[in-house]
Image: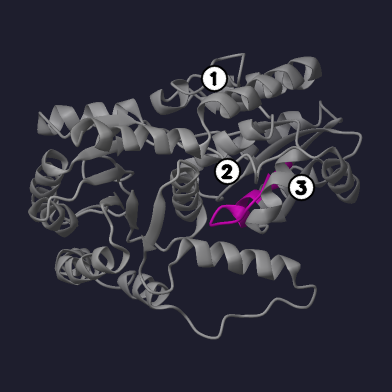
Amino acid sequence: MNILFHHRTRGKGAEGVHIRGVVKGLRQLGHQVSILSLPGAEPEAEEQHQKTAQQDSGPEKKPAGRSLASRLTEATKYVPEFVFELIEIMFNLVSLLRIRKAVRTHSSTMIYERYSLFLFSTVWWARRHNIPVVLEINDSCLVHRVRPLFFKGIARRFERWIFQNATGLVFISTHFKQTSEDAYGTIAPSVVSPNGADLDAFQPDTKRRTQLRKELGIDDKLVLGYVGAFVHWHGIDWFVDEIAGQLGDYPNVVLLLVGDGVCFEPIKEAVARNNIQSQVLLPGRVPHEQIATYIDAMDYGILPDSNDYGSPMKLFEFMAMAKGMVVPDFSPVAEVVEDNKTSWLFPANDREQCIKTTLELTQRPDVLKTVGENARRYIETQRQWRHNAEQLMSLVTTNHA
């Protein structure tokens, strides 16, 4: 099929990784895929930019100018919430014109859209033209959001209609799907498709692992790692606070915490305050192409916190690199992790047990290796992006047979 992938994101970070992954999976199945992005928010262009920057041995070059997507994102930070949501609603007209043009240009026979609040025009137009439209649900007015809604009632009415009139829905967790069914009753046919990993990008490499561990001075250490945003809802700040007082009892253990964000400086201060600089490495943010190597340099990973509807991208990337993770047993995590086989679960929000499990594993390197190998096999057999593509396409073949 000729598939149009439409999204309204910035196309960066985990969003960009997910979009590129699903597109790659669809192409592996033999489909033609074109991506409709906001100007300056093309995920594949972002990937190419990252590769070019990595290959350039000279100083990092700043882009010539800020993209429209970046300018709009920046501008909306400073407007009242009700104004922002009115802009989102009005965007339906712009989206309608862009979708119509893109479908004609690419002779698209199906639309796959990353769902955005208030965006109903795609489903409305696709139904009028008898084109199947499948929505990937990563957000909703039914779940906790960093930016609280002003027009929540309107958002629910729009969302109910969208969820009931799409050809199919792809939820990232069973809990998310059940929450939607409880709120809206009968919805479009749906599948649960957690995140995945690209095994071409996440491939263990002994030579790269050894080299990086030597560069970091951890070649003889047991390394616990974290990769991601340093934000409160990931819990990395409280994790460092909780483990700091006990880390000195485990002199062979090093924490390698990769990323940055609002919690970076407080964590850095906590490390200095507890005098554990030799056991906590904070390299900051690294290019996405280097993330696999940093994970490879670790022995296992930690995800201190998550939520009851999301599917953490890094969990799948760690498992793809044959690294188990200590993770909270929120239902979206528990449904993809087999405790003590592909990773380790602790009761969500139980900080004491999180630290206890993490430290106990430092004494069991053989278990770390076995669980890591199991995790890699799980990704190979069930959670490559091709598997996600197969799931979403089942919604079209089933309903348009």
Position of residue 45 measured from the top left corner of the image (x, y, whole percent): 52, 67
As helix, strand or loop, the secondary structure at mark 2 comes to helix
Q: Nearer the viewer, mark 2 or mark 3?
A: 3
Count residues near mark 1 (Cα–Cα under 10 Å), then give few for <14, some for 14-19, many for 20+: many
Relative height, residue 117 to residue 218 (above, below): below
Q: Nearer the viewer, mark 3 or mark 1?
A: 1
Magenta stretch encompasses residue 347: no
Residue 345 numbered tag: 1
The residue drawn where x is 65% and y is 19% is 374
Closer to the camera in the image, 207 or 30: 30
The residue carrying mark 2 is 237
Q: Which one is earlier in the sequence, the residue at label 2 or at label 3?
A: 2
Relative height, residue 12 to residue 320 (above, below): below
Magenta stretch encompasses residue 263: yes
Badge 3 vs badge 1, beta-carbon distance below 8 Å: no
| Amino acid at pointer 1 | Leu
Badge 2 vs badge 3, beta-carbon distance below 8 Å: no
Position of residue 117 measured from the top left corner of the image (x, y, whole percent): 22, 53
The residue drawn where x is 69% and y is 29% is 322
Instruction: Please state if 292 lies on the left or on the right of 122 as rendered.
Output: right
Does residue 351 appear in the picture of this structure?
Answer: no
| Region rendered in magenta | 256-267
